Image (spheres, grey):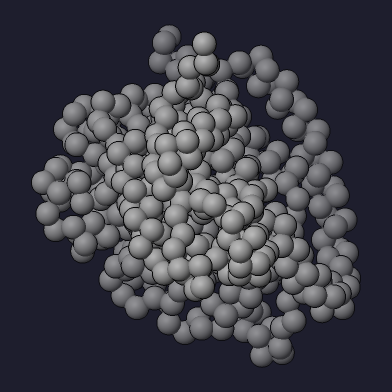
């Protein structure tokens, strides 16, 4: 009796997943990127017609609900490629990453949808430009301290997916780490949760998703310096296909990238309420039937629409270039060329949300050029601008790759430091203070700065975090300037 109930639940779960997938397709905005194709390119695409690809279940990058449905972040990018080129892509199921690579080597598939340039495929492969990127992160049990550098893993047992990008990266660059290859992320996190591994290194989106899915008491304790840039891989002889794909990928706007990200990273579905499920199914059946009818109508007009899109292509490219320029102007400080206050606010919100979700913390440094008004009054505003530009260049050259630098306003700058604790923040601030102090500026010669530092905590919001950094900066100024001050909690009110 219990076995029958379990089977019913499995069937209901599968039906609901299929319906949810279909509804996501219905309500997503279809984007067709028009291409000016030569006659030779049209003949090439017509000759290829269908390409086979394979991938494993790496939620939220790829979801394999059953033998025929393939969805997820990668699937959305493949849909843009198929809509824009007219090529059909057939999904071939694989159980492991090794099986995907074997199918590619044996010419059973023509596309590997998501590989890095550093991956060892075992045969020659042509790569498209990157269309998506995520860092490789370090997962540990909750009691482990922050890991500031990948080198801290040397001598430790670290899990990696067998022949995954993380496996190849650590094997080549950190021979002192004791690598433990596992079949997939789920197995790696299971071993980590049981204490059989010190850490697991993997793709940020996949690791975070699986920690949340399993409910294990694990955390993201750090991230490596490697960033996984997703590319499509095709066999030799497909140079034209790669060139056409690159043109489509280059036309994907930041808004489209964000829509795909938000659709899969931020949507959570609870399928426990079966009474609700069947109401959703009934509604979905009506919607799908109507959608199928309109889909047939739309397909008849598609050629006509494509013709119109070709005529508008030149105008569209011009508008996209102007839009890119406007976006850059809206988020970049005009004088220094770094992030402006608007962009820093946006990044702070994202970092705070990520911190609350993954249980990792981050730090900020608020710094201010000492006596900058005196520089302007003595040497003039033009020379003051030159000091700001050189000051910015010093910061850019000496912050870490993962840090975010921006101009907070006037002579104030903000540095956002992901996955950094108190010691890391203080080390970076003191390093910058000494570099600025010893630098020779034109005409002005010497220039100092004061630093206010803090790190986020579990009860934080952005206002509290910035207030602590501002109070620490004020304390540094009061202490005589050219000083680093750290506050880890709100200062007590006077009196």
Residue appearing at x 77%, y 39% in the figure: 288
Task: Tell me the quarter of the image containing the N terminus.
Answer: top left
Counting from the top left corner in percent of width and height, residue 40 is at 66, 90
Q: Nearer the viewer, residue 259 or 99?
A: 259
Residue situated furthest front in the rendering: 378
Residue toward you, 73 or 68: 73
| In this rendering, position of residue 188 left or right of residue 264 | left
Is residue 298 placed above or below 365 in the rendered structure?
Answer: below
Residue 363 higher or lower than 379, as above or below: above
Q: Residue at x 58, y 60 (%)?
A: 375
Occupied quadrant, residue 114: bottom left
Res. 381 in view: yes
* Closer to the camera in the image, 212 or 383: 383
Task: Measuring from the top left, give residue 360's x and y in whole percent.
Answer: 40, 33
Left or right, 76 with respect to 304, comes to: left
The image quadrant of residue 85 is bottom right
Toward which corner of the image does residue 89 lie, by quadrant? Answer: bottom right
Residue drawn at 70 percent across, 38 percent down: 23
Q: Eyeballing the image, is 3 above or below 16?
A: above
Q: Provide residue 247's location: percent of width, then percent of height.
A: 63, 75
Number of numbered discs overlaid on the protein picture: 0
**Residue in view at x 34 percent, y 25 percent:** 216
Residue 78 in view, yes or no: no
Q: Where is residue 242? Give x, y as percent.
A: 54, 77
Q: Nearer the viewer, residue 145 or 62?
A: 145
Q: Is residue 314 left or right of residue 201?
A: right
């Amino acid at each position: 009796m219990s076995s029958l109930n379990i089977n019913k639940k499995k069937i209901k779960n599968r039906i609901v997943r299929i319906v949810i997938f279909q509804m996501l397709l219905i309500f997503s905005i279809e984007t067709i990127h028009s291409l000016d194709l030569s006659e030779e390119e049209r003949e090439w695409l017509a000759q290829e017609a269908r390409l086979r690809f394979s991938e494993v279940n790496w939620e939220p990058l790829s979801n394999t609900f059953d033998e025929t449905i393939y969805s997820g972040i990668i699937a959305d990018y493949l849909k843009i490629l198929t809509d824009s080129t007219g090529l059909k892509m057939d999904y071939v199921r694989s159980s492991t990453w090794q099986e995907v690579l074997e199918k590619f080597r044996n010419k059973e598939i023509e596309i590997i949808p998501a590989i890095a340039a550093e991956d060892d495929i075992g045969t020659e492969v042509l790569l498209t430009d990157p269309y998506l990127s995520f860092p490789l992160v370090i997962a540990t049990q909750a009691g482990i301290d922050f890991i500031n550098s990948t080198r801290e893993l040397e001598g430790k047992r670290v899990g990696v997916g067998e022949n995954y990008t993380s496996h190849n990266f650590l094997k080549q660059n950190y021979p002192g780490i004791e690598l433990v290859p596992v079949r997939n992320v789920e197995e790696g996190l299971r071993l980590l949760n049981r204490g059989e591994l010190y850490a697991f290194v993997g793709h940020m989106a996949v690791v975070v998703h699986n920690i949340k899915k399993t409910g294990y008491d694990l955390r993201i304790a750090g991230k490596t310096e490697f960033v996984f840039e997703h590319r499509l891989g095709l066999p030799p002889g497909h140079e034209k296909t790669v060139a056409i794909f690159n043109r489509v990928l280059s036309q994907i706007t930041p808004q489209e990238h964000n829509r795909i990200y938000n659709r899969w990273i931020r949507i959570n579905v609870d399928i426990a309420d079966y009474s609700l499920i069947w109401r959703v199914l009934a509604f979905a059946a009506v919607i799908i039937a109507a959608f199928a009818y309109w889909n047939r109508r739309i397909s008849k007009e598609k050629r006509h629409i494509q013709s119109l899109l070709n005529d508008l292509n030149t105008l569209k490219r011009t508008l996209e270039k102007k839009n890119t320029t406007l976006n850059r102007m809206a988020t970049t400080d005009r004088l220094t060329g770094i992030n402006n206050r608007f962009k820093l606010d946006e990044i702070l919100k994202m970092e705070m949300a990520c911190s609350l979700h993954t249980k990792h913390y981050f730090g900020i440094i608020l710094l201010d050029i000492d006596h900058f008004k005196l520089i302007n009054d003595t040497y003039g505003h033009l020379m003051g601008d030159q000091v700001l530009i050189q000051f910015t260049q010093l910061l850019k050259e000496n912050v870490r790759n993962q840090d975010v630098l921006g101009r907070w306003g006037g002579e104030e700058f903000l540095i956002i430091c992901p996955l950094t604790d108190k010691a890391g923040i203080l080390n970076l601030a003191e390093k910058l203070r000494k570099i600025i102090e010893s630098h020779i500026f034109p005409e002005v010669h010497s220039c100092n700065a004061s630093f206010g530092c803090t790190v986020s905590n579990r009860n934080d919001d952005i206002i509290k975090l910035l207030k602590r950094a501002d109070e620490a900066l004020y304390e540094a100024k009061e202490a005589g300037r050219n000083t680093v001050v750290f506050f880890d909690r709100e200062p007590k009110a006077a009196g």
